[in-house]
Image: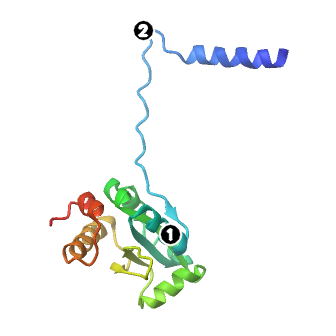
Amino acid sequence: MTGTRAVLVSTLLLCLVAVPTPGHPQAPPARPSPQMAPMLPDFTEAYAAALNQNRLLIVLFGEKTDFKDKAFPQWDKLRSDPVLAAAFVFGASLLPDDPVGLKAARQLKMAHLPAVSVFTPRTDGLQELSRFEAAYAFEDLRAPLVADVCKALGEGRFQHPQTQALLGCKT
């Protein structure tokens, strides 16, 4: 009991010390870091999450060296964008270690890696909306990515009112 009482007293003292007193200014609260969308580690997991969450899927396909050399140094900026983070599930497919991702890349006839593909997940097959094969800076990738998705929505290639509203696509 004595040890438990000592721990309890120490905890209470720490709490009392942490309470601000009048005349002693408190440090300003730390600025919250931007919320970054999680990066799911393989194509299968990312596709399943996009289906379950009813969101579009954006996948970074690449080889080990692409990820080690940070061929996409601005990728985290895409994942930190609040609009894109709300509209997309983000996934990575490390080739050839991700067999389902490798099969998808072959089916889509990807010519160059690294590549970014946008999918509308369906249970009956892959529907790719957009693809970018090469390293892009965030400023160069965000605008065409949004434009391609909005164009596909406008053409009726898929229906997704939530994404249309999030991205500000005109009807």
Mark 2: which secondary structure? loop
| Any part of residue 14 in sight | yes
Q: Amino acid at mark 2?
A: Gly
Residue depicted at 72% across the width and 17% down the height: 8
Label 1: how many Cα within 10 Å (few below 14, some 14–19, many 20+): some
Q: In this rendering, which labeled residue sits more in front, label 2 or label 1?
A: 1
Residue matched to label 1:
48
Residue 14: where, in percent of width, then height? 63, 18
Between residue 54 and residue 130, name the one nearer to us.
54
Rendering quarter of residue 137: bottom left
Residue depicted at 48% across the width and 68% down the height: 91
Of callouts 2 and 1, the N-terminal one: 2
Residue depicted at 27% across the width and 72% down the height: 149
- Left or right of 154 in this view: 18: right
Instruction: Kindly give the residue lying farthest to the front in the view shown.
Output: 124
Vertical placement of residue 29 versus 171, above or below: above
Q: Give the numbered dot on residue 75.
A: none
Residue 110: where, in percent of width, then height? 42, 88
Vertical placement of residue 158 versus 38, above or below: below
Residue depicted at 55% across the width and 18% down the height: 18
Q: Amino acid at mark 1?
A: Ala
Vertical placement of residue 111 versus 84, above or below: below
Instruction: Kindly give the residue lying farthest to the left in the view shown.
Output: 171
Mark 1: which secondary structure? helix
Q: Give the numbered dot on residue 23.
A: 2
Residue 97: where, in percent of width, then height? 61, 80
| Any part of residue 69 in sight | no
- Left or right of 97 in this view: 67: left
